[in-house]
Amino acid sequence: MSHKTLGLDSQLYNYLLSSCLREPEILRQLRWQTASHRMARMQIAPEQGQFMALLVQLIGAKKTLEVGVFTGYSTLAVALSLPPDGKIIACDVNQEYTDIAQQYWQAAGVANMIDLRIAPALETLDRLLANGEAQTFDFAFIDADKENYQGYYERSLQLLRTGGLMAIDNVLWGGRVANPEVADRHTQAIRAFNHLLHQDERVTISMVPITDGLTLALKRGL
């Protein structure tokens, strides 16, 4: 996976950042700390965080969902773009990674907006559905283990309101999805997910070649 937009050489990528990126200092600090982490490749790129923040503002989101938190950059980017009464349900299984996230959420003054659930995300999503929260979320971001993407997608789609937006990360998977000689389980899972989404008439979709590929799925009224 990539933590900067695929297909851009260093000169053009640096131009993109210098000409477009408006990254709050607290996000920059978190990004730089995460860059030294042993799993830094899991970090989304700053241009993707800014793009997601714009999407959240465009749809007037208040209640959002995140599956896969890592050190919390995407969560923080979204939280900083929500209104004061906004809320994020953030799902992850790793306390070590999310301890870093919580330090920055606190420093940014948005910790009260983020409800972190440390548990398998499928269990958390099922619990939200069982609690009557279907069709109450405005925005969802999926960036977790690829083999469970279909399960995360189906549950998140139920949780989204009509007109709600879902963003799914790593759909280009470093370009490996387009290489027929690559057949590991992660790549096959993403290929299968991309095919499923392409056929799903419940959503309007667009695959955006930002960072490692981000598919946007707008829930349609049926």
Image (spheres, rainbow, N blue to C red):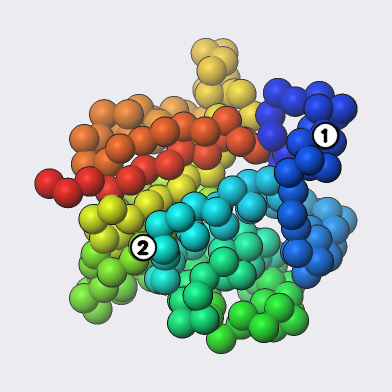
Residue plotted at (21% across, 76% down): 132
Q: Amino acid at mark 2?
A: Asp
Residue that numbered label 2 is attached to: 138
Residues marked 1 and 2 touching at CB (< 8 Å): no
Per the model, the C-alpha gap separating discs 1 and 2 is 33 Å
Instruction: Identify the image quadrant of residue 217.
Output: top left
Q: Nearer the viewer, residue 161 or 81?
A: 81
The answer to whether residue 147 shows anywhere in this view is no
**How busy is the neighbourhood of tag 2: few (under 14 within 10 Å), some, or many (20 plus)?**
many
Q: Is residue 105 above or below residue 197?
A: below
Disc on the earlier residue, 1 or 2:
1
Tag 1 secondary structure? helix
Q: Find residue 2 and report its horizontal and vertical position in percent.
A: 70, 37
- Is label 1 or label 2 in front? 1
The answer to whether 129 is drawn above or below residue 158 in the figure is below
The circle drawn on residue 15 is: 1
9 sits left or right of 51 in the view = right
For the point 27% across and 41% down, which residue is it? 203
| Residue located 31% across and 73% down the image | 128
* Name of the residue lying farthest toward the top: 180
**Side of 158 relative to 210 (left or right):** left
Secondary structure category for the residue under label 2: strand
Q: Spot the residue most to the left.
A: 222
Say which of 93 and 137 sits in front. 137
- Which label was assigned to residue 137? none
**In this view of the protein, which residue sits in the foreground, 25 or 120?**
25
